[in-house]
Image (cartoon, helix red, strand yellow):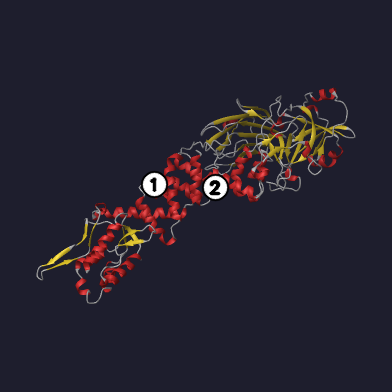
Amino acid sequence: MFDQVRNQVRQQFEIMRSGPLFSVAVDREEIWNTYLKALPAAMQPECSCNACRSFMRQFGGIVAIKPDNTLQTLWDFEAADPDYAAAVKAVRKYVARQAITGPFYADAVRCGTERNADLKRDIVWTHFYIDVPQAVVVPGIRRGPLVGTAAADQHVLLRSMQELTPDAVQTTLELIAQGTLYRGAEFRPVIEKFQALMTEFQAVPAGCQTNWSWRAAAQVANKAVVRMRNTAIGQLLQDLSEGRELDAAVSAFERIMAPANYKRPKALVTPRMIDEAKKRITDMGLLGALARRVLTPDDLNVTNALFVYRAAKRGADIFESMKQQVRVNPRELSKVDTISVADFVTNVLPGVKHMRALVLPQHAGNFVTLLGPQNREEPSLFAYGNSFGWSYTGGVADSVKQRVKQAGGKVDGVVRISLSWSNYDDLDLHVIEPHTGHIYYGDKRGDSGGVLDLDMNAGSGTSRTPVENICWVRPPKLAGTYLVYVHNFCRRENEDQGFTVEIEYDGQIHTFSRPKNGNTTQRFDMFSFECTRDGQLTNVRPAPGVTEGGSAGVAKWGIQPNQFHRVDAITLSPNFWNGNHGNKHFMFFLEGCRAEETPRGFYNEFLRSDLADVRKVFEVLGSSVAIERSPTELAGIGFSETQRAELYLEVEGAFKRTIKVQF
């Protein structure tokens, strides 16, 4: 009987109404014809009433979404009356093939007509009808915006699930957990809910993901979760999902959320990144190579040392020791031979038995120490094939000049002023010329002939080894006083603070530094100098509060400047011990020299290529690994082959003489 089928439809709807209801894209005539034509031919005239037709056209496409994310229709039952079985099955099959168009809404709580009377024939006809929840009763004028909003929610949620990656979500949560992400705590509940939805989504078969997204979008109350991809934090997730470098992605997020002078409190390395790096390093058998130590004379041999001092077996000569403490003015050493470092290594060094080096104030930035693994046999972390490295004072692997050269700046002019720092801040180098001239990013060519040829990290942080450079190819044209200062145009983080400004002229290098970058718009006067009418530089003076690397009379690493000190050993930098890789350094290790600062364990510049994807972790590891120290460690002064410098050496072999070695 029809009433049995009608009641089954109502019962099915009662099951469905416990969750969100949707409409599918049925053709109003096709769904009715599908039902009518599947009935026995004899029944079709009797069942073709307008009331049932209207119900089928308006409400036959109501669906819900089952736990397995397939569609649940009004027709998901086996008809109690066999005469209606084929019709119910046909409509069920037709509706289940259609796509959801949006949430279901009705004009009134009663959909369809329960019954009507035929007074002429004294018959009461019954029809399909259902009673719907008040929540889905919406006047027609309001339905369009509601359906549009629901469709947009579903679309964005589905795209978020398809385009954002679980790794990006987990990385962001880790940044929030360690307090690295600006206002991160505000986003934690939203991202955690999104992560739970993502886990659920990943278990859904591909053919059912659209259905899942309709139900999830309707059920999640916080629309920031649903529209994650279109939020500020969603942009960070999208950047990370697309493989953008972590620092760049977070910086982009900060520009959206924070003022220009936002200060990041911690480095952008998450626990998961560290775990992944540890697994990679362990799998490669490199974990032991992370334990570092400062090298001692026992580590030197014929393959890596150019010279090793062998003390004669005799009593200590107190008078010779006193002579070493005499201060020396290099201007008094005019009658000395000047030779290249290549000539020194090839023709002088083989016959030397004893040697002393004159350490001058301008050598303060050249102090260096060698490092290696605690177990010498550990495999190499580096591209040049051995396990040894070096660290200059201040935690650098190479000179400021080398950085400038690698970045494309000019280093062979008459005067060079370079700024170097180690984070994503946008620092700017300025030179105020006599007569109000000004060289900076806004006017790169000065009146005196200086040219700013490098301006890094402007606009956004792209380098953690940035430099700026002003070079005079010819002597400065203007006589008078020049003032050099640094301006923090945009502070972006707290990590790796401090900067160095270096001036090179007439074979001399003066280095000035500050420990902090300051805040956005903060200016730091660094030093001034005089230029004579014939283009000579004089009176290089640091500004108050500025540390000068070459301050006369100040001992460094146990070495007094302007005195000769015994050279215990000479080596090339380890990247030239068993091959040629990168920039060559010549290192002179001195008696009694010992690093007063903890050397950096290693530098990313020289890592093996197969460690490239964990470089960010190594950047932090390099400054945090424990360094085993020794009372007899190798420390002294080093010179890069690309940095113009000179060193006075008192050498003794068949006879004794003083020479000046040029690098």
Compared with 643, 87 (above or below) is: below
x and y percent of residue 295 in the render?
A: 74, 37
Circle 2 sits in a helix, a strand or a loop, which is it?
Answer: loop
Residue that label 2 marks: 245
| Residue closer to the observer: 233 or 521 | 233
| Residue closer to the observer: 313 or 508 | 313
- In the rendered structure, the answer to whether residue 143 lies left or right of residue 476 reads left
Q: Amino acid at mark 1?
A: Ala
Q: Quadrant of residue 67?
A: bottom left
Q: Residue furthest left?
A: 120
Q: Residue furthest bottom?
A: 41
Quadrant of the rendering where the C terminus is positioned? top right
Residue that label 1 marks: 224
x and y percent of residue 509 in the render?
A: 69, 33
| Residue closer to the observer: 418 or 608 | 608
Determine if residue 481 is in view: no
x and y percent of residue 429 in the render?
A: 58, 36
Determine if residue 559 is in view: yes
Q: Amino acid at mark 2?
A: Glu
User: Which residue is found at the position 78% from the left and 40% from the top?
Assistant: 300
x and y percent of residue 9 in the render?
A: 26, 63
User: Which residue is found at the position 28% from the left and 73% from the top?
Assistant: 38
